[in-house]
């Protein structure tokens, strides 16, 4: 059984930083894809960042240059470093894991962690 547990969300002022963590059990991130989705108030869920088993990364245009996804294989954890946060980054952030990047939306999901950016 796959479990993904997110942490690191919170309230931050615009321009600040947060680091989200996603600790996994039942799946090995180093041989699977991992990703972060978010869903803001009144918005559709969107893929923010992803990392493949080979370590390739991709980002939504709205976060390029500000967010960085990374992975610690020893801890079986995926991170999302978020810098220069904007109020429009306010959302619930969800960690996902799947066998490939294209399957992330259909894979395992965490419970979500709230990120609120104040102006």
Image: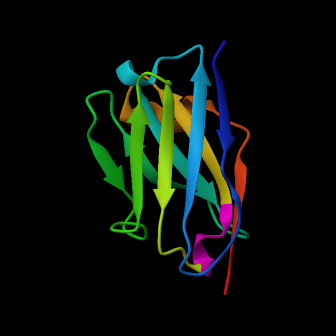
- Identify the residue shown where x is 30% and y is 46%: 57
Which span is picked out in magenta?
87-91
Residue 27 vertical position relative to residue 46 in the rendered view, above or below: above
- The N terminus lies in quadrant: top right
Q: Nearer the viewer, residue 49 or 73?
A: 73
Q: Quadrant of residue 19?
A: bottom right
Q: Main secondary structure of the magenta part?
A: helix
Residue 45 vertical position relative to residue 63 in the rendered view, above or below: above
Q: Viewed as shown, does residue 119 lie left or right of 69?
A: right
User: Residue 71: in sight, yes or no?
Assistant: yes
Count every numbered label the image shows and give the total. Answer: 0
93 within the magenta span: no
User: Residue 45: in sight, yes or no?
Assistant: no
What percent of the width, then of the height, locates residue 83? Answer: 47, 68
Q: What colouring style does the render use?
A: rainbow
Q: Nearer the viewer, residue 82 or 32?
A: 82
- Identify the residue shown where x is 47% and y is 17%: 28
What percent of the width, then of the height, locates residue 50? Answer: 40, 44
Residue 103 vertical position relative to residue 57 in the rendered view, above or below: above
Q: Viewed as shown, does residue 24 lie left or right of 30?
A: right
What percent of the width, then of the height, locates residue 15? Answer: 53, 80
90 within the magenta span: yes
What percent of the width, then of the height, locates residue 113? Answer: 71, 50
- The C terminus lies in quadrant: bottom right
- Identify the residue shown where x is 36% and y is 19%: 31
- Identify the residue shown where x is 26% and y is 40%: 56
Looking at the image, the residue that sits furthest to the bottom is: 119
Q: Quadrant of residue 67?
A: bottom left
């Amino acid at each position: 059984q796959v479990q993904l547990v997110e942490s690191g969300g919170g309230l931050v002022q615009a321009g600040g930083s947060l680091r989200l963590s996603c600790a996994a059990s039942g799946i090995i991130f180093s041989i699977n894809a991992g990703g972060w989705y978010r869903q803001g108030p009144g918005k559709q869920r969107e893929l923010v960042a992803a990392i493949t088993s080979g370590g390739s990364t991709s980002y939504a245009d709205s976060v390029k240059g500000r967010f960085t996804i990374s992975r610690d294989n020893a801890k079986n954890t995926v991170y999302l470093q978020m810098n220069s946060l904007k109020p429009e980054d306010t959302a619930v952030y969800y960690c996902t894991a799947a066998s490939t990047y294209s399957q992330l939306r259909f894979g395992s999901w965490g419970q979500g962690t709230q990120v609120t950016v104040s102006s």
